[in-house]
Image (spheres, rainbow, N blue to C red):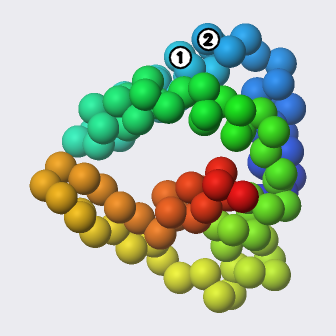
Amino acid sequence: MCKTEATKAKRKLQTLLKHDVEDSLLALCGRLGSYSDACRATVIDNFDAIYRTLYHLDVKELCDAVGLCSETMNSAGPAVYAATRPGDVQCEFCEKVVRIKNH
């Protein structure tokens, strides 16, 4: 299921103009309540890297890394959130996505 949906999302992304992708991410940030400002700042500060990562996304690698493939689903636990500094949010899912980007 993850690979199917991620593939659909990747195809959709590749049909959009770059600024439309940014607008969509910022709109998504707006739905995150108290995290929306941090999300917007992250998107604005890192958009080029985010866009490149999403555009060239290896769907299987993403699904495996976040534990959403059937092979890895059983070993994936719930995301754990912990603030490292006041105002910061850290989660295992986010760290996995960053690890994918750094490969």
Counting from the top left corner in percent of width and height, residue 80 is at: 39, 73
48 with respect to 31 (left or right): right
Q: Quadrant of residue 8?
A: top right
Residue topped by disc 1: 23
* Amino acid type at image mark 2: His
Q: CA distance from mark 1 to mark 2?
A: 6 Å
20 with respect to 93 (left or right): right
Of 1 and 37, which appears nearest the observer?
37
Residue topped by disc 2: 19
Q: Residues within 10 Å of mark 1 (few under 14, many from 20)?
A: few
Disc 1 element: helix
Quadrant of image for the C terminus: bottom right
Disc 2 element: helix
* Amino acid type at image mark 1: Asp
Quadrant of image for the N terminus: bottom right
Counting from the top left corner in percent of width and height, residue 32 is at: 35, 40
Say which residue appears at 64% left-offset and 67% top-offset: 66
Say which residue appears at 41% left-offset and 64% top-offset: 91
